[in-house]
């Protein structure tokens, strides 16, 4: 059985930057499950018609088709219960909090910092779509929204809960990584893959956690292709 993950790519098929797809890639590695990733771009809507969905990640696991990163993590826990990601009951509710925290608090600050780098990393055929949809959502042009100084200040404030959590263990889930770590770290992989911006000072406790996360699963995050690795792509 070949397990397949449809994974967002950019100007190079090897440039995989979706924070949601990174959640799933790390979760699969956590479970020790092999997967074949299939590059997908914003305008490849027909490629996902079989899933009745228009966004990635989409996981095909045998006869099962699962969409939405958080639902994929829940599916993996149900289907492959060893090495839990989220757990059940109160533990799963805790994971859901980190999902919302990453998406609603961290992501806007990061986007304000890296949005123009992100636009540059997207495949040229997808840039018009990205600009139109994001500017509609933001209510302003990307150039007007882009403000690294404001974004970094906003992110520094947003990271306070992570610093507090990391005071009690090496990972957000305690002494070992699990779902909460992957839900949050996916955002940092998004920024790392498309930008050279330094989001966190090396004196910050979050920096140490990021270094530990990058080394997990044989350096899955650390070895990922970055836009800075692509000749002529970064400006």
Image: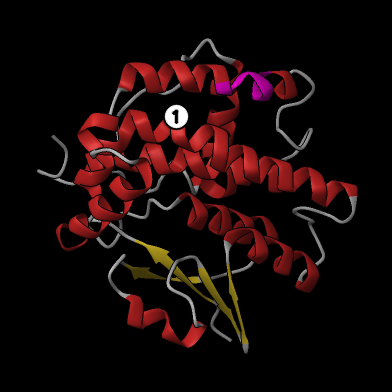
Q: Quadrant of the N terminus?
A: bottom right
Could you tell me which residue is drawn at 79 percent across and 33 percent down?
Answer: 174
Q: Position of residue 87 (x, y in %)?
A: 83, 54
Residue 108, by quadrant, is: top left
- Residue at the image position 36 percent from the left and 81 percent from the top: 47
The answer to which image quadrant residue 43 occupies is: bottom left
Q: Is residue 228 left or right of residue 198?
A: left
Question: Of 178 and 136, which appears nearest the observer?
Answer: 136
Residues shaded magenta: 158-163
Q: Secondary structure at mark 1?
A: helix
Residue that lies at the very extreme toward the top in this rendered image: 203
Q: Is residue 99 left or right of residue 218?
A: right
Q: Quadrant of residue 9?
A: bottom left
Q: Residue furthest front?
A: 139
The x and y percentages for residue 198 are 37, 22
In the current view of this chain or complex, which residue is farthest to the left? 232
Of residues 161 and 26, the one drawn nearer to the viewer in this rendering = 161
In the image, residue 204 sits, relative to residue 221, either above or below, namely above
The C terminus lies in quadrant: top left
Query: What secondary structure do most residues of the magenta stretch adopt?
Result: helix
Q: Indicate the position of residue 214 as horizontal and vertical percent values.
A: 51, 38
Residue drawn at (55%, 14%), measured in percent from left and top?
Answer: 204
Task: Identify the residue under disc 1.
Answer: 109
Q: How many marks?
A: 1
Q: At which x and y percent is residue 189? A: 45, 42
Q: Residues within 10 Å of mark 1 (few under 14, many from 20)?
A: many
Residue at the image point whose x is 34% and y is 76% from the top: 45
User: Residue 102 or 191: which is nearer the viewer?
Assistant: 102
Q: Is residue 202 visible?
A: yes
The colour scheme used to paint the residues is secondary structure
């Amino acid at each position: 059985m070949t397990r397949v993950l449809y994974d967002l790519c950019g100007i190079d098929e090897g440039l995989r930057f979706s924070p949601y797809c990174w959640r799933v890639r790390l979760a699969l590695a956590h479970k020790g499950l092999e997967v074949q990733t299939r590059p997908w771009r914003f305008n490849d809507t027909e490629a996902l018609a079989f899933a009745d969905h228009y966004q990635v990640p989409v996981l095909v696991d045998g006869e099962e088709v699962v969409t939405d990163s958080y639902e994929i993590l829940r599916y993996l826990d149900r289907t492959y219960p060893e090495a839990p990601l989220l757990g059940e009951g109160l533990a799963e509710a805790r994971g859901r909090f980190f999902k919302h925290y990453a998406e609603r608090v961290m992501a806007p600050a990061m986007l304000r910092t890296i949005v123009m780098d992100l636009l540059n990393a997207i495949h040229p055929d997808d840039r018009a779509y990205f600009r139109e949809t994001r500017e509609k959502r933001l209510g302003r042009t990307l150039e007007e929204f882009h403000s690294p100084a404001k974004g970094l200040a906003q992110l520094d404030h947003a990271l306070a809960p992570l610093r507090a959590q990391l005071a009690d263990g090496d990972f957000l889930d305690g002494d070992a990584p699990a779902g909460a770590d992957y839900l949050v770290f996916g955002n940092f992989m998004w920024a790392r893959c498309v930008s050279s911006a330094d989001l966190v000072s090396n004196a910050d406790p979050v920096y140490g956690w990021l270094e530990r996360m990058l080394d997990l699963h044989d350096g899955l995050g650390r070895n990922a292709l970055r836009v800075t690795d692509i000749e002529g792509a970064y400006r």
